[in-house]
Image: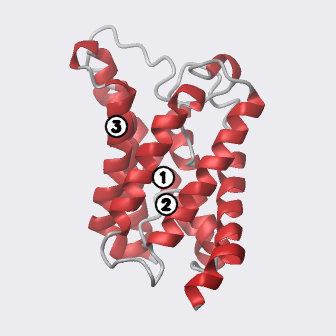
């Protein structure tokens, strides 16, 4: 378990440092033109690369919602859920601390939202609580279906990280304007600790909605789609 927790911490660190870092650091130089499409791709690449790097050790979850969904789907031991969550949150917090240390090396840097998630006034497009909750549930459910499908015995071997990484890229392309994209409670927690907004006060939603969405996606896969897999 020690090695699995280390892999999850390292993978989640990479996801937050690379994904949120692309938003926090590149945003300081608009002329780079990375935009939200570039940030979306950065998140997808973090998962793709670390899934290949350490996925063979821990399964490559890097996300408490993914761990829960896999447990609901019968692909992950419930007894391992809390240790994975601890490792994932630890990795995310360490990444946020490292990003803050780098970002404050630029004169005049102000953390502001620090790539955190939010609804209402903290939503990039000022979307309502309901809209933000709904999109997080739907997209996390879809993410779990992609994960479960791409890792099933019917899927081509070796391509799951690519499908999962591209799915996370798509998710960000859709939802950055709405919530700044969570679908990952650990990612939301790490940067919320640094943000100079009420991101911590809204953090409950970015645990509740992704966890609910992951469970929903797992149930859809388990009860509506696995009968085909068994044939």
Question: Residue 160: percent from the left, percent from the top?
Answer: 38, 68
**Which of 228 and 130 lies nearest the eye of the viewer?**
228
**Which of 94 and 155 lies nearest the eye of the viewer?**
155
**Left or right: 48, with 119 as reference point:** left
Which numbered tag is attached to residue 225? none
Residue 6 shows in the view:
yes
Residue on which disc 3 sits: 98
Question: Residue 23: percent from the left, percent from the top?
Answer: 37, 28
Q: Neighbour class for label 2 at 10 Å: few (<14), some, many (≥20)? A: many
Residue sticking out furthest to the bottom: 231
SS at circle 1 = helix
Cα separation, mark 1 vs mark 2, equals 5 Å
Residue on which disc 1 sits: 90
Q: Neighbour class for label 3 at 10 Å: few (<14), some, many (≥20)? A: some
**Left or right: 14, with 83 as reference point:** left
**Left or right: 143, with 36 as reference point:** right
Ranked by sequence position, the earlier of labels 2 and 3 is: 2
Picture residue at 41% right of the left edge, 13% below the top: 110
Picture residue at 59% right of the left edge, 90% below the top: 230
Instruction: Quarter of the image for the C terminus: give it.
Output: bottom right
Residue sticking out furthest to the top: 108
Which numbered tag is attached to residue 87? 2
Ranked by sequence position, the earlier of labels 3 and 1 is: 1
SS at circle 3 = helix
Residue 48: which quarter of the image?
A: bottom left
**Which of 34 and 85 lies nearest the eye of the viewer?**
34
Question: Residue 185: percent from the left, percent from the top?
Answer: 59, 47
Is the residue under label 2 in contact with that under label 1 (CB below 8 Å)? yes
Position of residue 23 relative to residue 150, above or below, is above
**Which of 210 and 89 lies nearest the eye of the viewer?**
210
Residue 102: which quarter of the image?
A: top left
């Amino acid at each position: 378990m020690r090695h699995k927790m280390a892999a999850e911490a390292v993978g989640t660190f990479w996801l937050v440092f690379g994904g949120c870092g692309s938003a926090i650091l590149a945003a300081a130089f608009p002329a780079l033109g990375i935009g939200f499409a570039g940030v979306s791709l950065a998140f997808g690449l973090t998962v793709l690369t670390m899934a290949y790097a350490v996925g063979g050790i821990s399964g490559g979850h890097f996300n408490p919602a993914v761990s829960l969904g896999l447990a609901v789907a019968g692909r992950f031991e419930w007894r391992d859920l809390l240790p994975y969550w601890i490792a994932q949150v630890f990795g995310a917090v360490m990444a946020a601390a490292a990003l803050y240390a780098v970002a404050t090396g630029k004169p005049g840097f102000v953390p502001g939202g620090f790539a955190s998630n939010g609804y209402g006034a903290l939503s990039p497009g000022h979307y309502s609580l309901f809209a933000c909750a709904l999109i997080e549930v739907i997209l996390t459910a879809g993410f779990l279906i992609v994960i479960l499908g791409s890792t099933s015995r019917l899927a081509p071997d070796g391509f799951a990280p690519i499908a999962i990484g591209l799915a996370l890229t798509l998710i960000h392309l859709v939802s950055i304007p709405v919530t700044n994209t969570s679908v990952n409670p650990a990612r939301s927690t790490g940067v919320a600790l640094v943000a100079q907004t009420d991101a911590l006060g809204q953090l409950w939603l970015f645990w509740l909605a992704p966890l609910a969405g992951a469970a929903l996606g797992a149930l859809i896969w388990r009860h509506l789609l696995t009968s085909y897999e068994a044939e």
